[in-house]
Image: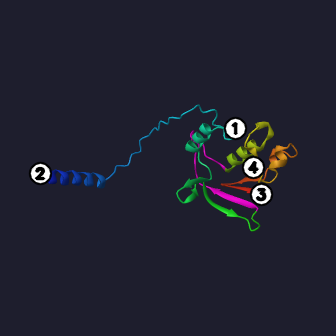
Amino acid sequence: MSSRKIALTGLALAALTLTACSKQESSQKEQDLNWSVGGEITTMDPSKATDVVSFSQMINSMEGLYRNSKDGQSPGLATSAQVSKDGLTYTFNLRKSKWNDGTPVTAQDFVYSWRRTVNPKTEAEYSYLFSGIKNADAIQNGKKPVSSLGIKAEGKSISWSSL
């Protein structure tokens, strides 16, 4: 290899290295993400979604108590979790967060959503996923009121009881 090619290669590598090491300027500018899907989104209602496209969009635009990560699960909206000594009650403390319109996410939002999902009037196909929550099966069978679901909001935390 000629000395000129070696010099040009060295110069190019140096430029790349210096570029990679340069200070990145933080930006407070609003950014947009355009997302393409290979099908029609039938609903963005977590209680009513049954198709892959809708679920994929909700996973990519909403956050749950935990997130999937390379290490398994990491906190999402939950900052911490406690399990009662008898193993039947789970309490999650929520971090400060906002909906897309700027209103705060509250523990009561979870209570509303879970009650709505088990309510037979909602006709949620995946309501059976809540069958481990106290009174969920009885509510779905019309034997107990929706308000008896074993979930409650207390300040910035939610608790639910299993069977």
User: Which percent across, then down, holds residue 32?
Assistant: 46, 38
Residue at x-position 85% and y-position 48%: 138
On residue 130, the disc is 4
- Dominant secondary structure of the magenta stretch? loop
In the image, farthest residue toward the left: 3
User: Which percent across, then down, holds residue 64?
Assistant: 62, 50
Q: Which amino acid, by three-letter code, is at mark 2?
A: Arg
Circle 2 residue: 4
Q: Which amino acid, by three-letter code, is at mark 4?
A: Phe
In terms of depth relative to the viewer, which is nearer, 160 or 46? 46
User: Which percent across, then down, holds residue 44?
Assistant: 63, 37
Specify the segment rendered in magenta. Answer: 88-106
Q: CA distance from mark 2 to mark 4?
A: 70 Å
On residue 79, the disc is none
Q: CA distance from mark 2 to mark 1?
A: 66 Å
Q: Quadrant of the C terminus?
A: bottom right
User: Which percent across, then down, holds residue 112?
Assistant: 72, 44
Q: Residues within 10 Å of mark 3 (few under 14, many from 20)?
A: some
In terms of depth relative to the viewer, which is nearer, 117 or 93? 117
Q: In the rendered structure, which disc, 1 or 4, sits on the residue that comes first in sequence?
A: 1
Circle 1 residue: 48
Q: CA distance from mark 1 to mark 4?
A: 14 Å
Check residue 105 for magenta coloring: yes
Label 4 secondary element? helix
Task: Confirm or deny contact between disc 1 and disc 3 (CB under 8 A).
Answer: no
Task: Confirm or deny contact between disc 2 and disc 4 (CB under 8 A).
Answer: no
Label 3 secondary element? loop
